[in-house]
Image (tube, rainbow, N blue to C red):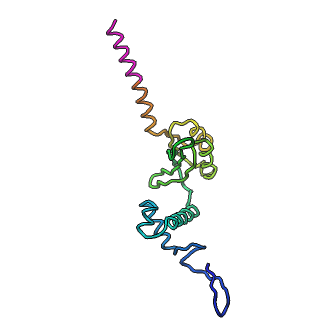
Amino acid sequence: MRRVNCPDCGIKVEAVPWATGKNHLVTTYAWFLASWAKRMSWKDVSRAFNTSWESVFRSVKMAVTWGLAHRNLDGITAIGIDEIAWKKGKNKFMTLVYQIDAGRKRLLFTGENRTKATLTKFFTEFGQKRGSLLRFVCTDMWKPYLAVVAAHAQQALNILDRFHIMKHMNEALDKVRIEEVKALKKGSSD
């Protein structure tokens, strides 16, 4: 909507289909910038298309807002839960939940911190009905995540990711190897 000062009719508010709200960018151009922001840094997009970083930011925000309003969370039967380190110091992790159904992989949730409360927030937003339809949940072996999954998706098969299983297996093998070497050395010195 734009205000127009017509000399015959006075001030009128007119709809302009190529822009929304108080945005200074044409909607098509904002979508164009947002699509490039998936491929390059926002700074590089602003330089490449001779626009401000703020215009790229607003374009991405517009696209994310539209996507969240139009996303469909029905039919999800498999999710993965993990965390990533995103800054130094206390509370340096983010919790990620993503769909891992065959043929459909997408990020569903990001939350600050690696806590039971953060993962509980996902399940609250996801909804009890959708949570009850989950068949598979892939997590690491972190006990707080396992407790939240048991509380909100007890019917789902909880699959522990192979990275952490192999890590624990290799640690156990290393412990056995060290004990065997010590036993061999002790036995040869007797």
Quarter of the figure with residue 90: top right
| Residue farthest to the left, as pictured | 188
Q: What x and y, as percent, mark residue 159? A: 49, 40
| Residue farthest to the right, as pictured | 10
* SS majority, magenta: helix
Residue bounds of the magenta highlight = 175-190
Q: What x and y, as percent, mark residue 115? A: 59, 42
Quarter of the figure with residue 14: bottom right
Q: Is residue 136 visible?
A: no
Depth order, front residue of 148/101: 148
Quarter of the figure with residue 50: bottom left
Instruction: Please state, as top left, top right, bottom left or bottom right, where the N terminus lies in the image.
Output: bottom right
Image height check: is 165 above or below 179?
below
Q: Is residue 31 magenta?
A: no
Residue at image point 65% right, 93% down = 8
Residue at image point 57% right, 48% down = 112
Residue at image point 32% right, 9% down = 188
Q: Is residue 117 left or right of residue 35?
A: right
Q: Is residue 136 left or right of residue 176?
A: right
Q: What x and y, as percent, mark residue 54? A: 52, 65
Residue at image point 40% right, 22% down = 176
Q: Is residue 114 visible?
A: yes
Image height check: is 117 above or below 108?
above
Instruction: Please state, as top left, top right, bottom left or bottom right, where the C terminus lies in the image.
Output: top left
Q: Is residue 85 left or right of residue 8?
A: left
